[in-house]
Amino acid sequence: MPDLLTSRAATDPDHTALIVAGQGSLTLADWDERSTAAARALPGPLKGDRVALVFGAREWLDYAVSWMAVLKAGGVAVPLSDRLAPPELAYMIEDCGATTVVHGGAEPVLPPGPAAVPLAELLPGPAAVPLTELLQGTAVREETVALDPLSLAQILYTSGTTGRPKGVAATHANLTSPPVHPKRRPFAHSRHLVHAFPIGTNAGQVMLLHALTAAPAVVTLPLFTPARFAALIEEYAAGTVFVVPAMAAELLNARVQDRHDLSSVLLLGSAAAALPPSVAAGLTAAFPNATVANYYTSTEAAPAQTIMIYDPDRPGSLGRAAGGSRLRIANADGTPVAPGGTGEVWLRAAAHPRAYYNTGEDGAFQGGWVRMGDLGRLDDEGYLYLVDRESDVIKSGAFKVSTIQVESALHEHPAVADASVFGVPHPVMGTAVAAAVVATGPLALSDVRAFLSTRLAGHELPTVLLTLDTLPRNAAGKVIKRELRRMAEE
């Protein structure tokens, strides 16, 4: 990874790589110079030691410098958001065996009990180091270290929506694939790419890699609100925009297109979860010149992905494998299912694969293939359709209900701004269908069932309805369904 920055900084030093709204910007030359200075000041040589990077959304610039500094010093970067609850943060730092914690302006605080103490005091192993001290300190080595492409570069923790987060380890070879030709940089139609993904997520890391290798400057908004996001797009006349489906729904519900000029956007990408067809259709109207594309991957599978340009004739498809990736539908053991059959989705990249760190589990990885945890099928032309998350399928009596299908139908209701579907215990059926919605007006269960009765089968209709102000989501924008189940039980 450091070679990519050093070589590009040498040829295009004044190119703005990263802009944080309201905070400043970072050129390639600044990024290279500051990260080298910080790398020389880190205790080491690190030789594969894990370094936790705890930064807030307003600290993207310092985070980018610290991330590259750890790699230049031969360490393994562990990106963590300061939005994490203190127990989660402590668990991840301990799980990866971090020897050092680098943080931004405010030192992270973790409470061991009633009284809060600085992280450096709480954890006797890791030493918390502010970035400002690294940049002002004395160099402990003259040069950065030589790196093996197959050595670990970073550990990202999964979102943990169904269980405890797992660390996913990626090598330098994984992060630098596929190679980018200097004359064919991604998103060359744009001068600016806008997103609002948080630090510590796979989507956020992909945007950081774009800042390093893509043509446009990457602009990030520390705190997403529909109005601020739309204003940022208009201010920079952004040609490329990335969102998660929850952000897309908020933009449409706020009708930002009525107050902001969004005509500059030529590519609107959605990642992290399946984009409901009705939301995709709404985006094509709100962004009149944009091609709407759905990107499907996972923290474990990256850089393997499928890409689907929204097609009204295939509204529910996630597309075909792209960028040298391969796709198959198979059983849990990796055995392919019959053509057209439903099975588990597996992805494979033309890159060195990732792996779980420190878990001893390898069931998701098999000969370069990654088990996505989703059920899906392929049509005759190789387009992927998701049936559901394997863990989310509702087994109600003799039927299996796809939560994705019910959620897509709910999004068509004119009074539903956001929706999530999950299973709740039922004394006769075993599990019943429940729905949580954010409504724009009064909404009763009978209204929802009547609306859905022309779109879904009887066993797919919700028997429980929660109306909420917002759906509980993690930092990656995914709904935390175990929290919805708890609410339904209460």
Image (cartoon, rainbow, N blue to C red):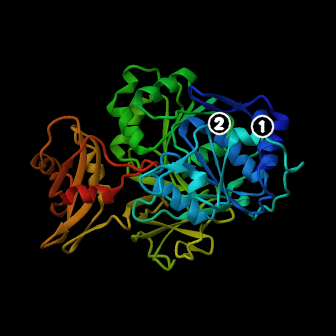
For this orientation, the residue located farthest to the left is: 446
- Asked whether residue 476 appears in the rendered view, the answer is yes
Which one is in front, 141 or 388? 141
Image location of residue 6, percent across then percent down:
82, 43
User: Which residue is under mark 1?
Assistant: 136
Q: Where is residue 403, by image quadrant?
A: bottom left
> Is residue 290 positioned above or below 162 on the image?
above
Image location of residue 50, percent across then percent down:
67, 60
SS for dot 2: helix
Q: At x 52% / y 46%, what residue is drawn?
A: 82
Three-letter residue code for mark 2: Leu
Image location of residue 254, percent across then percent down:
34, 29
> Is residue 315 positioned above or below 125 on the image?
above
Three-letter residue code for mark 1: Gln
Nearer the observer, disc 2 or disc 1?
Answer: 1
Dot 2 or dot 1, earlier in sequence: 2
* Left or right of 128 in this view: 11: right
Image location of residue 393, percent across then percent down:
31, 66
The mark found on residue 419 in the picture is none
Q: At x 70% / y 38%, what residue is drawn?
A: 132
Q: At x 74% / y 47%, what residue is drawn?
A: 69
* Left or right of 132 in this view: 236: left
SS for dot 1: helix
Which quadrant holds the C terminus? bottom left
User: Which residue is under mark 2?
Assistant: 61
